[in-house]
Amino acid sequence: MNKETFDYVTERVDTLADSEFSTQVTKDAAQAWKDAVAANSSDAAIDAATNDLLDVLEGRPTTIDGVIAFLQGPAIEMLGEDAAASALAAQQQRKEAGAKYCDCEACSAATEILAKFDRIEL
């Protein structure tokens, strides 16, 4: 992996490891990548760790439809009616503009990594 790609992945892995929006599975996968890279920085080891990370991330980012469903249901009680309605309107606009995934920091980092390695299209 070239340095530019490595730096790109590293930045997003840091986000995944630290984000309050990441699930524990995602945080664990991000930390496993960081640990593997720290233990062995050979190209083969980095490629293997990255493939493991990609395998975990596939299917994890919330789709835009999932975000909209959340905002139409549980978010009303969690965030309040006005905040949920405002967020819903914003996400519906994003969907109309072609967005496919949630735009929280964790989902954004995951989808950017997956897209970089041609596992999804943004």
Image (cartoon, helix red, strand yellow):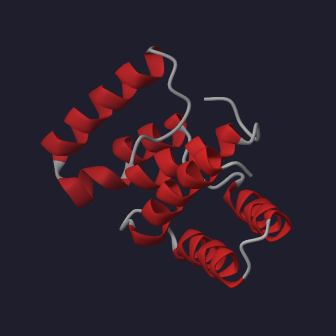
Residue 51 in percent (x, y) is at 80, 60
- Horizontal relation, residue 108 to residue 43: left or right: left
Observer-nearest residue: 100 or 33? Answer: 33
Q: Is 11 placed left or right of 91 in the picture?
A: right
Query: Is 23 or 14 nearer to us in this picture?
Result: 14
Residue at 54% x, 60% y: name it. 10
Q: Vertically, is 35 above or below 100? A: below
Q: Give the image quarter of residue 120.
A: top right
Please report the residue visible at 57 percent of the width from the left and 42 percent of the height from the top: 112
Q: Position of residue 62 (x, y in %)?
A: 54, 48
Q: What is the number of callouts on the image?
A: 0
Position of 46 with respect to 113 (left or right) is right
Q: Residue at x 21, y 54 (%)?
A: 79
Look at the picture and state if 49 lies above or below 79: below
Q: Is residue 38 left or right of residue 22?
A: right
In this view, 60 is above or below 118 = below
**Viewer-side residue, 118 vs 102:** 118
Query: As displayed, is residue 48 above or below residue 28?
Result: above
Where does the C terminus fall, quadrant-wise? top right
Residue 7 image position (x, y, % from top left): 54, 53
Q: Residue at x 37, y 31 (%)?
A: 91
